[in-house]
Image (cartoon, rainbow, N blue to C red):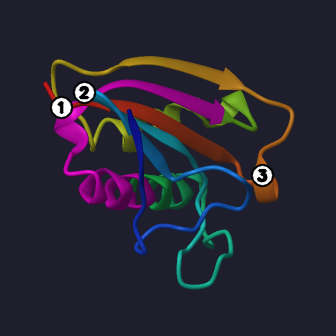
Amino acid sequence: MKQAVSSQDAPQAIGPYSQAVRAGQLLFLSGQVPLDPATGQIVDGDIAAQTHRVFKNLGAVLAAGGRSFADVVRTTVFLADMNDFAAVNAVYGEYFTEPYPARATVQVARLPKDARVEIDLIATFE
Protein backbone atom coordinates (compact mmCIF):
# COMPACT_ATOMS: atom_id res chain seq x y z
CA MET A 1 0.00 0.00 0.00
CA LYS A 2 1.30 3.47 -0.82
CA GLN A 3 0.11 6.88 0.31
CA ALA A 4 0.96 10.33 -1.06
CA VAL A 5 2.32 12.89 1.41
CA SER A 6 2.43 16.62 0.77
CA SER A 7 3.00 19.93 2.51
CA GLN A 8 1.79 23.41 1.67
CA ASP A 9 5.07 24.66 3.17
CA ALA A 10 7.07 23.19 0.29
CA PRO A 11 6.79 23.90 -3.43
CA GLN A 12 4.01 22.00 -5.14
CA ALA A 13 5.05 19.36 -7.64
CA ILE A 14 5.81 20.80 -11.08
CA GLY A 15 4.86 17.56 -12.83
CA PRO A 16 2.90 14.34 -12.40
CA TYR A 17 4.56 13.20 -9.18
CA SER A 18 4.04 13.40 -5.43
CA GLN A 19 6.17 15.44 -3.02
CA ALA A 20 6.55 12.17 -1.11
CA VAL A 21 5.14 8.67 -0.98
CA ARG A 22 4.93 6.44 2.06
CA ALA A 23 5.30 2.75 1.24
CA GLY A 24 5.27 0.51 4.29
CA GLN A 25 7.93 1.68 6.74
CA LEU A 26 9.65 3.99 4.23
CA LEU A 27 8.97 7.56 3.15
CA PHE A 28 10.39 8.47 -0.26
CA LEU A 29 10.76 12.21 -0.88
CA SER A 30 10.98 13.54 -4.41
CA GLY A 31 13.88 15.80 -5.20
CA GLN A 32 13.56 19.37 -3.99
CA VAL A 33 15.19 22.34 -5.68
CA PRO A 34 15.59 25.76 -4.02
CA LEU A 35 12.14 27.08 -4.86
CA ASP A 36 10.44 29.47 -2.49
CA PRO A 37 7.01 27.86 -1.94
CA ALA A 38 5.36 31.30 -1.76
CA THR A 39 6.63 32.53 -5.12
CA GLY A 40 7.55 29.38 -7.03
CA GLN A 41 10.88 31.03 -7.90
CA ILE A 42 14.47 29.99 -7.19
CA VAL A 43 15.66 31.82 -4.07
CA ASP A 44 18.29 34.51 -4.42
CA GLY A 45 21.74 33.92 -3.05
CA ASP A 46 24.74 31.70 -3.31
CA ILE A 47 24.81 27.91 -3.34
CA ALA A 48 24.70 27.80 0.47
CA ALA A 49 21.49 29.87 0.55
CA GLN A 50 19.99 27.68 -2.15
CA THR A 51 20.95 24.51 -0.28
CA HIS A 52 19.35 25.80 2.93
CA ARG A 53 16.13 26.41 0.97
CA VAL A 54 16.24 22.85 -0.35
CA PHE A 55 16.53 21.56 3.22
CA LYS A 56 13.66 23.78 4.39
CA ASN A 57 11.51 22.30 1.63
CA LEU A 58 12.58 18.75 2.50
CA GLY A 59 11.98 19.42 6.19
CA ALA A 60 8.42 20.57 5.50
CA VAL A 61 7.63 17.41 3.54
CA LEU A 62 9.29 15.21 6.16
CA ALA A 63 7.16 16.87 8.86
CA ALA A 64 4.00 16.32 6.81
CA GLY A 65 4.92 12.64 6.75
CA GLY A 66 5.55 12.54 10.48
CA ARG A 67 9.33 12.25 10.10
CA SER A 68 12.41 14.43 10.66
CA PHE A 69 15.97 14.56 9.38
CA ALA A 70 16.90 12.12 12.19
CA ASP A 71 14.85 9.47 10.34
CA VAL A 72 16.63 9.87 6.98
CA VAL A 73 18.59 6.80 5.84
CA ARG A 74 19.51 7.71 2.23
CA THR A 75 20.02 10.87 0.17
CA THR A 76 21.02 11.77 -3.34
CA VAL A 77 22.55 15.19 -4.04
CA PHE A 78 22.45 16.45 -7.61
CA LEU A 79 24.76 19.36 -8.44
CA ALA A 80 24.91 21.45 -11.59
CA ASP A 81 28.59 22.10 -10.78
CA MET A 82 30.74 19.76 -8.68
CA ASN A 83 32.79 22.83 -7.68
CA ASP A 84 29.87 23.57 -5.31
CA PHE A 85 30.45 20.28 -3.45
CA ALA A 86 32.28 21.74 -0.42
CA ALA A 87 29.73 24.52 0.16
CA VAL A 88 26.77 22.15 -0.23
CA ASN A 89 28.48 19.59 2.01
CA ALA A 90 28.94 22.22 4.75
CA VAL A 91 25.22 23.06 4.72
CA TYR A 92 24.27 19.36 4.46
CA GLY A 93 26.22 18.68 7.65
CA GLU A 94 24.03 21.15 9.56
CA TYR A 95 20.94 18.99 9.04
CA PHE A 96 22.23 15.51 9.95
CA THR A 97 23.95 13.88 12.91
CA GLU A 98 25.65 10.53 13.25
CA PRO A 99 24.91 7.99 12.07
CA TYR A 100 24.73 9.96 8.83
CA PRO A 101 22.50 8.79 5.99
CA ALA A 102 24.03 6.89 3.11
CA ARG A 103 24.52 9.30 0.20
CA ALA A 104 25.42 9.69 -3.44
CA THR A 105 26.45 13.01 -4.98
CA VAL A 106 26.53 13.49 -8.73
CA GLN A 107 27.03 16.31 -11.18
CA VAL A 108 24.28 16.59 -13.76
CA ALA A 109 23.97 18.51 -17.01
CA ARG A 110 20.90 20.46 -15.92
CA LEU A 111 18.30 20.61 -13.12
CA PRO A 112 14.66 21.76 -13.15
CA LYS A 113 14.27 25.54 -13.37
CA ASP A 114 18.07 25.70 -13.84
CA ALA A 115 18.60 25.13 -10.12
CA ARG A 116 22.16 24.56 -8.93
CA VAL A 117 21.24 21.84 -6.40
CA GLU A 118 18.54 19.21 -5.94
CA ILE A 119 18.29 16.68 -3.12
CA ASP A 120 16.01 13.70 -2.65
CA LEU A 121 15.86 11.37 0.32
CA ILE A 122 14.41 8.29 1.97
CA ALA A 123 13.30 8.21 5.61
CA THR A 124 12.27 5.27 7.74
CA PHE A 125 9.50 4.73 10.29
CA GLU A 126 11.47 2.06 12.16
Residue 42 at what x, y percent from top left? 67, 69
Above or below: residue 105 compared with residue 67 = above
124 sits to left or right of 5: left
77 sits to left or right of 116: left
In magenta segment, residue 59? yes
Q: Residues within 10 Å of mark 3 (few under 14, many from 20)?
A: few
In magenta segment, residue 14? no
Q: Earlier in the sequence, mark 2 or mark 1?
A: 2
Q: Nearer the viewer, residue 108 or 125?
A: 125
Instruction: Indicate the amino acid at tag 3.
Output: Pro
Which contiguous range is marked in magenta? 56-78
* Secondary structure category for the residue under label 2: loop
Q: Residues within 10 Å of mark 1 (few under 14, many from 20)?
A: few
Give the residue at mark 2: 25
Instruction: Indicate the amino acid at tag 1.
Output: Phe
User: Which corner quadrant of the image does residue 84 belong to?
Assistant: top right
Q: Are dots 2 and 1 in contact, CB under 8 Å? A: yes
Instruction: Indicate the amino acid at tag 2.
Output: Gln
Residue 86 at what x, y percent from top left? 51, 32
Specify whether residue 39 is in view. yes
Above or below: residue 41 compared with residue 95 = below
Q: Which mark is residue 112?
A: 3
Q: Which mark is residue 10?
A: none
| Residue at x 40%, y 67% (from the top left corner) | 7
Give the residue at mark 1: 125
8 sits to left or right of 34: left
